[in-house]
Image: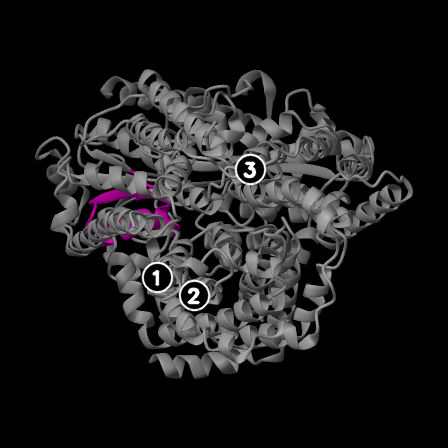
Amino acid sequence: MSGWDGFLHGLSVAAQPGVLIYCMFGVLLGTFVGVLPGIGAMATISLLLPITFYLSPEAALVMLAGVYYGSQYGGAVASILLRLPGTPQSAVTTLDGYPLAQKGRAGVALFTSMIASFSGSMIGIFVLIVLSGALAKAAVAFGAAEYAAMMILGLVAASTVGAKQPSKALAMVVLGLILGCVGTDVNSGVQRFTFGQTELMDGINLVALAMGLFGVAEVIANIRVAERTGVPPRIALRDLLPGKAELRRIPLPALRGGSLGSFFGALPGTGSTISSFLAYALERRLSRRPQEFGNGAIEGIAGPEAANNSAAISAFVPTLALGIPGDPIMALMLGALVIHGVQPGPLMLEARPDMFWGLIASFGIGNLLLLVLNLPLIGIWVSMLRIPFRLLYPAILIFVCLGVYSVRGSSFDMFAVALIGIIGYALSLARFSPALLLLGFVLGPLIETNLRRALLIGRGDPMVFLERPLAAVFIIAAAGLIAMSVVQVIRRRSASAGGQTP
Amino acid sequence: MKRDIPDLAGGVILAAIGLLVTVYSLTHYEIGSLRRMGPGFFPALLGGVLAVLGGMIALPALGRRGTSFHIAWKECLAVLAAILVFAAGFDRLGLVIATLASVLIATLATPDRRIGWRIALAIAVTILSVAVFSVGLKMTVPLWPGR
Amino acid sequence: MIISRRAALLGAAAASLCKPALAQEAGWPSQPQHVFVGFPAGSSPDLLARIVTEPLSDTLGQPFVIENKPGAGGVIGVQQMLNAQDIENSFAATINGPLTTAPRLTPNLGYDVESDIAPVALIATSPLVLVVSAEFEADDLSGFVDAAGAEPEALAYGSVGQGSGAHLTAELFSDRAGVEMLHIPFTSYAEVTTAIIGNEIDCGFMAPSAAMQYVEAGQLKILGITSAEPFAQAPGVPVMAGQAGLPDDFRAELWNAFIAPAGTDAAVIETLNTKINAILGDEAVQQRLLDMGWQAAGGSADVLAQRIATDTEVWGSVLDRIDAKD
């Protein structure tokens, strides 16, 4: 079945009332839990899992997927308004979304993120229709060497384009990589830096880290500030929406981000995190006003949001065609399929076209629903900012705690969130970027495992990274980026030195 | 005196963490060979890199004036205590009492000295968290002491 | 219609189990019961537990609530059962690891299998199959052993982690067949199959359900199975025992079991064992397990205790061998 035929067939599946209603329910619930700080798609989907026993497999998958991408729309709201990202992807959105909101342009930031998310999803669906077969093959061609090389490129790209002080940016990435080492070493089974805590054997909980670094740290920093500045004035309706000049800054970044995301999303593992950081790095490099980034650049929201939404869609290719889930949420959805006796694998696209294409078509419908649902809500979200912070933050803290607890039912993780929150506050005082720490944390274990695996498979020969053409391309690109930024730093140094001596 | 305190302190702390990680990895975990890297290889390497980066951050900060900053001690303490009380209490005391206590502690950080709004807020947040997590999402958490 | 069929099957399973039993007369269970699972919702141990707890809730009249406490290869689930506030009403469903190899592999385990845990019933077992790429040079086990024996580490195999069933089975196989293979740890069977198809590694032991689709698609082939008898989910696959120089008693199986904290009332364990055996005797339940690649097991609590003891010994000797090699 060709992509377009498949998609049309899928539309007929997804438009059945018995499926459509679960799609609607899923995206609604997803938006809701996404907005709530702390609790995210992961907890919601695990709690919904028993219900799926009683649904058809198509309806179950469509509903769970709806929660997944619906929560990304909602997550953007929490990231922009409260600087509370639930995932590393939406951590990128805080970089420019939150500063915009602080300037009273929250409506513009929300509008941008929603339009970009929607465009990203559409690009993802389009790429999937045209290339579904090729994407599945690309994932098999990726071995340990390719993964290691690609993640190194991702890290380099994200951190060299970093802040004014490259050493501070790099230090955060490295600290993240070190934190990523905590837990059981995949290759040797040795427990590293767990200090006898069984709870640390699987590493530091990602949600606890994200919530502590951003959420709790932000609460601490904001209590006094918010008390001084008081409640922001009511915003007129026309200020909620972007002006013409701002609108023009959305389409190109969204297109670039969406394309980037659909490629990286198809690679199982961290496609969606890498792609949102890469999209951010790319926009910053292409921009004529790079100094705006970090202070509320529209492109800094549009690119990453489009990228992570298109990646979320193409990520279903490896999940369904190879059975390799890109993240724990995908793993959960695989479980839902297995309940129904559906084994994901190479035969799934052919054996269960109803399910595969029905799901893809439901993405289209669900995203349209989300856009229609969320655009009118912008006004309501923005007015949430008018609630005095002293009434808001105790609730945020409780929700963060319960959200972190809901991930794996561990009280240990709540204690961890308190400690990480204090560290996050200290980092923000000294102007270190927690987003880069999170990136290092997510990619670290993958780089290490794949690097060591590649060397083990290559029987110790480091040339494996250059002999495999794809890996070589990534390594050369990474080296090129480093060289470029070194040149840039030197040029800037000599330029500023020349400028200072009159 | 010209000192960029945040960068100086941050750099020194990071360098110290890096050194500690390297030393700990070298003494506790196997380093292995290039072919079969041991569990200590990666962290030992990363610790070294972090130590160098920490130095690179701290040194220039010695001769530079930093931006002024202010540590919010009271807020730190209140938030920390609120989370710890909640984390330690909700298993034994149940969601309702833990939430009430935690919200009341958290509100200590605000300068508004009145008491009424704090109690109202604690009750409101408790109702909300029970409604969302226990009733809505059916999370298995005890509501009251001793189940 | 899948919805109604499944609901009907569950209903039938429930109806056939409505006989009163020992502990019920004593008023147990009078409260909701907790079943700790050391793996996330949706994982295979979790799904197996749910297949058993759903009919249990129906027949015993109190909900058996699954509490997912994932981590440390299932060990956290067992620890949480032992530390539960409501320990009288707490149980666990777990894979073999936390009861057999964990005392060797996990520092600070915090429990002693023999004195802290009361076996209730074996739920299901699964053999492992030896999988190679469809392009692999040999078509049978003796050809494979020849290729693997050509030189030390001539072949590399993938596992789902240090100390996992896939790792230990491969080492047991290497030992018995007199070969030495290179171990490459991955984290899931899907990664292992992808690596075999991509020709990064040569082979791997895995659950039949993880391999069958790829075999049908012509990308992988199976050279043998580790059970004593052929397995319904892997039709036509020869049993490994007795072939290519392997001893006749060569056997390796993964299993899932229902356990209770030591000190649980014997009548309660007896009731649970009876009920679980009745559930596992139901054909619809057996089919659901088979669809997921598992063979319904059952038997008395002693059968499980025996299983724990033998596996602890067998895997212990394999672990000794691995330790000696390093």
Report the residue at 50% width, 52% height from top. A91
Question: Farthest front residue?
Answer: A502
Q: Which residue is mark 1?
A: A282
Foreground residue among A5 and A307: A307
Q: Residues at marks 3 and 2, common chain?
A: no
Is there CB contact under 8 Å for labels 2 and 1? Answer: yes
With A131 as the anchor, is A341 left or right in this view? Answer: right
Report the residue at 59% width, 71% height from top. A23
> Type of residue at label 1?
Leu
With C107 as the anchor, is A19 left or right in this view? Answer: right
Foreground residue among A335 and B68: B68
Q: In front: mark 1 or mark 3?
A: 3
> Type of residue at label 2?
Gly
Report the residue at 75% width, 56% height from top. A231
* Cα distance in 3D space between marks 1 and 3: 33 Å
Foreground residue among A202 and C99: A202
Q: Position of residue C166 (x, y in %)?
A: 34, 37
Question: Farthest right residue?
Answer: B116
Report the residue at 31% width, 27% height from top. B48
Q: Is residue A147 visible?
A: no
> Type of residue at label 3?
Ser
Helix, strand or loop status at disc 3 = loop
| Coloring applied to the structure | one colour
Q: Which residue is mark 3?
A: B68
Q: Position of residue C126 (x, y in %)?
A: 42, 42
Q: Which residue is mark 2?
A: A303
Q: Quadrant of residue B13?
A: top left
Write the start and end of the magenta stretch as one range. C185-209
Residue A201 part of the magenta-drawn span: no
Q: In front: mark 3 or mark 2?
A: 3
Q: Does C274 sit above or below residue B126?
A: above
